[in-house]
Every structure is written in C-alpha cells, then in structure tokens.
Image: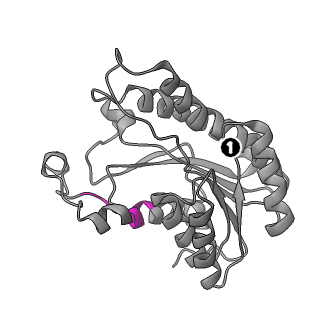
Amino acid sequence: MKIDLSGKTALVTGASGELGRVIARTLAECGADVALHYHSNEAKAAEVKSAVEALGRRAVAVKADVAKQDSVEAMKQAVEATLGKVDIVVANAVVQYQWTSVLEQPPEDYVSQFESCVLQSVFLAKAFIPSMIEQKGGRFIGINTECSMQNFPTQSAYVAGKRGMDGVYRVLAKEVGEHQITVNQVAPGWTISERERTAGLQNSEDYIKNVPMKRRGTDQEIANMVAFLASDLASFTTGAYIPVNGGSVMPSI
C-alpha cells in the first residue's frame, strides 16, 4: 500500500513559502502534476517548479491574489490551460503580520486574516469544486493551525481567520460529499521549516514542554498528512480537522 497520485493534478497555494514548497514537492513525489501559486516571490516559485519537473512531473507557476475572486478565476484558467482540470486543491497561503494583543492589534490584520483564510477558501471552492463535481470526485484540503484550539494571547487575528475557515470547510464537506469530494483540514503545530534548519532554530524548550512527543514537527510531516488526504487512502475521510503537532492539542469527542 502506498500513496499514489499518478494521473492527478494538484494546486498548492502559497507554494513558494516554507511549507508550501514541501507540500508541492511531496505531492509530485507521489506522482501528481502540480500548479504552484505564488503572490510575490516569483524566483522561489520558479525554483519549486524546477524541483517538481526534476521529479518527472509537469508544473506551472501562477501569480495570483487569493483574496480576490477575479484573480483566483484567472489562476484557474491559467492552470487548466497548462495542466488540465485540478483534482486536488491545497489552500496553504496566508498573510503574515505582527501578532499582538486584541487591544493593540490593528483592524486591518483581522481583515487580512479573514481574506486569506475564509475568502481564499470560498473563492477556491467556487473556482475548482464545479469541475470536481463533473468528474465525480476530488480533494479540497486546507492548512489550518493548532492555534485554533489554543486561543493563546496575541493569537486573536490568526485564530479568528482560521476558525472562520474551519466553519467554511465543515459546511462545504456536507454540501459536496455526495459528489465523492472530500474536504479536510490539516492543523500543524509550530513547525520546523528549512529556514529554521538553516538558522539552527529547531529547539524551543518552552514550546515542547507542552508537547507529549517532546519535539516540534517538521514541514515534511505536515506534507505527508496532506499527501495522505489527497490520496485514495483517505477516500472516506471528510469534514476532519486533523492536528499534526505531536499531541499539543487534542480535539475532544
């Protein structure tokens, strides 16, 4: 038994970012062709495209603003013109900002999180779900966060956006399930990325003391869960919020 995405086409938003590039490469290693969304880092997107192609898969890098519906629609047209219909959508892009208290957080940060978490998901669904319905199947995967369950000080804008996203995914799962389309969320903990490996910042005692597995997860471990959910092995899993964080948060029943 293995994860086989041969013949599938995936779209990864934020594919030029630390986690996005690992997700894109992992899906390609499993056999998928990959559309690589980026917002501003064209050079890194081109680098990821070359890495995917080196694995023998087709790839296209597409610039778009995922908080704007017309931009997402234009991205869809560009991807389909090059790679065909998309079978797997991974909503990974998110706006970065400076975290602070509710009383100090600028209102525009709440707007940016709503746009990049909630509206991105809505616009991606509107653009790509109809063809999945026609094909009688598909995978819609969002990158959420353990913060949605932690609700720690200074997390408010991020948590607000991701909790709103969670609501969209749960409703969407019920709306499109009859078409054999699964809708799931992966919720990483504080993840070690290539940037932190390079800088030697993998350790954080204050964080891992509250993690049952006593370590931080890696970008590859997050990408592995995405690949599983994208595959036929997860064909009967939908509406799930799946923490990949060594047990630092545990959804209850």
At a point 36% along the width and 42% down the height, the residue shown is 146
At a point 58% along the width and 37% down the height, the residue shown is 116
Q: Which residues are magenta?
A: 216-222
Above or below: residue 219 compared with residue 151 = below
Left or right, residue 93 beside residue 129: left
Which sits in the foreground, 198 or 93?
Answer: 198
- Look at the image and say whether residue 201 sits in the magenta stretch: no
Q: Position of residue 40 (x, y in %)?
A: 61, 52
Left or right, residue 93 beside residue 252: right
Which sits in the foreground, 106 or 193?
Answer: 106
Work out which residue is located at the far top of the displayed protein and give it. Answer: 103
Above or below: residue 88 compared with residue 94 = below
Amino acid type, mark 1? Asp
Q: Is residue 195 visible?
A: yes
Q: Position of residue 143 (x, y in %)?
A: 50, 48
Which residue carries the number 1 mark?
65
Q: Position of residue 221 (x, y in %)?
A: 39, 64
Left or right, residue 76 beside residue 154: right
Mark count: 1
Above or below: residue 233 compared with residue 157 = below
Left or right, residue 98 beside residue 66: left
At a point 57% along the width and 59% down the height, the residue shown is 15
